[in-house]
Image (cartoon, helix red, strand yellow):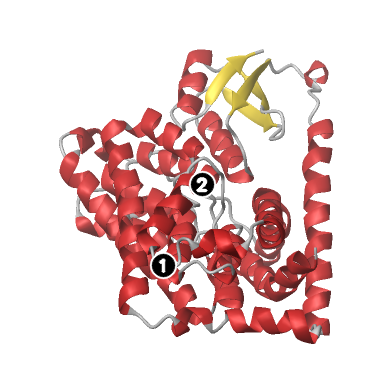
Amino acid sequence: MREILELVNSMSPYLLLGFTLAGLMHAFIPATMYNRYLSGSNFRSVLNAAILGIPLPLCSCGVIPTAMSLRKDGASKGATISFLIATPQTGVDSIIATYSLMGLPFALLRPFVALVTALFGGTFANYVDRDDDEKATVAMQGCCSQEKETTFAQKIRNAANYAYVEMMQDIGRWLVLGLVVAGLITVFVPDSFFSLFADRPLASMLMVLLFAIPMYLCATGSIPIAVTLMLKGLSPGTALVLLMAGPAVNVASLLVIGKVMGRRSLMTYLFSIVGCAILFGLGIDYLLPREWFTASLEKIHSCHSCGEMSYFNTVCSILLALLLANAFIQRYRKGKENACSCGACNITAWTITVRGMNCNHCKSNVEAAILKMDGVESVEIDLASGRTIVRGNPIKDDVIKAVEALGFSVAEN
């Protein structure tokens, strides 16, 4: 328990800063910007997708419907793959949190490796599927509809809600899970187990991939696990493989990408992430001084012995815990408040269950896809259960196809 608390105290100020910056990005950067620069099967669209995706605080479940929506709105296949690779591996929040625990070298390497991997994967996807990509250049009329004008005060409120409610609902449980796993590794896994891989970095990287693929790890939640593995003796290169591949290659993401984008795109995606992660990991272990990546761990070691903890860090940890608790309470309270009151209105209501939504980004993408359908008046979604109430008189098959195009499954109630 003490190890978990120390990790939380080290990360909490940076996590709060990261959540705040993510909220400001969400509120002040127009969503249409992400659609405008991603069409065309060329290197420029791949580069734009990577640059746009790297700072976005989207986890692997949230990035899939977002990417599918961009694809549907005209993004090339290469740009979509580039966005799918770059976004879950990083994020402004995870970059700042990486700096807090793992130091500047790791914080700089994460976005750089994500950029190189995204450029390679996106360019390769354009080359492999160039003929199939002609349909992606469909005119984007309607996809970039005018956004509602909002005041500065409204944008600040939107930023706060996104940062301290929606993002914490999406990332919070995975962050907590990562901290718990890190604590369990510290307590129950003997150092002698990892010493078997001390001089075999490639074997340790393959071992980490073997465990990372079936798991769900977000970019921020993977940090305490990577730190714990390094404290147990694994190499910095192995930690990098976990940080880069772990958040992007879980089974759920792979299944959806294969279903929506095709087998060739899935193989390109998987080969790019795993290959580049191992290549850069080996480069770190064999070409760069180990001290660059282990110096920050000395601070964690010293905390165990000195027992000194900053009051500021403690206050930040308490604030973070309160915000997480509030976010979870709001999430499950909304499920009870979303009961249909259609008997009081004259609009036809139709209820379906959308399966596969795991975060607010999934929910917002489903809402946007349904609202684009002719005849839809409004839509309400309970994220916890997937219960979706569509009001109006749309063509039901069109609504189902629009939701399934994002990678979700639909069941009529």
Horizontal arrangement in the rendering, residue 408 relative to residue 46 (left or right) = right
Horizontal arrangement in the rendering, residue 140 relative to residue 235 (left or right) = left
Horizontal arrangement in the rendering, residue 324 relative to residue 93 (left or right) = right
Q: Which residue is mark 1?
A: 237
Q: Earlier in the sequence, mark 1 or mark 2?
A: 2
Quadrant of the image occupied by residue 164: bottom right
Q: Are marks 1 and 2 in contact (CB under 8 Å)?
A: no
When the figure is inspected, residue 76 is found, relative to residue 325, above or below; the finding is above
Rendered location of residue 305, percent (x, y): 76, 83
When the figure is inspected, residue 311 is found, relative to residue 13, above or below; the finding is below
Q: CA distance from mark 1 to mark 2?
A: 16 Å
Can residue 55 be seen from the camera position used here?
Answer: no
x 36%, y 40%: residue: 71
Quadrant where the image shows the N terminus = bottom right
Q: Which residue is mark 2?
A: 211
Rendered location of residue 329, percent (x, y): 83, 46
x 73%, y 81%: residue: 303
Quadrant where the image shows the C terminus = top right
Question: Which of 201 and 282 lies nearest the eye of the viewer?
Answer: 201
Rendered location of residue 189, percent (x, y): 64, 57
Question: Which of 207 and 67 lies nearest the eye of the viewer?
Answer: 207
Mark 2 is surrounded, within 10 Å at the Cα level, by few (under 14), some (14 to 19) or many (20 or more) other residues, namely few
When the figure is inspected, residue 32 is found, relative to residue 356, above or below; the finding is below
Residue type at tag 2: Phe
Can residue 304 be seen from the camera position used here?
Answer: yes
Residue type at tag 1: Gly
x 70%, y 66%: residue: 153
Rendered location of residue 287, percent (x, y): 30, 77
Q: Secondary structure at mark 2?
A: helix
x 47%, y 39%: residue: 253
Mark 1 is surrounded, within 10 Å at the Cα level, by few (under 14), some (14 to 19) or many (20 or more) other residues, namely many
Question: Which of 21 and 266 lies nearest the eye of the viewer?
Answer: 266
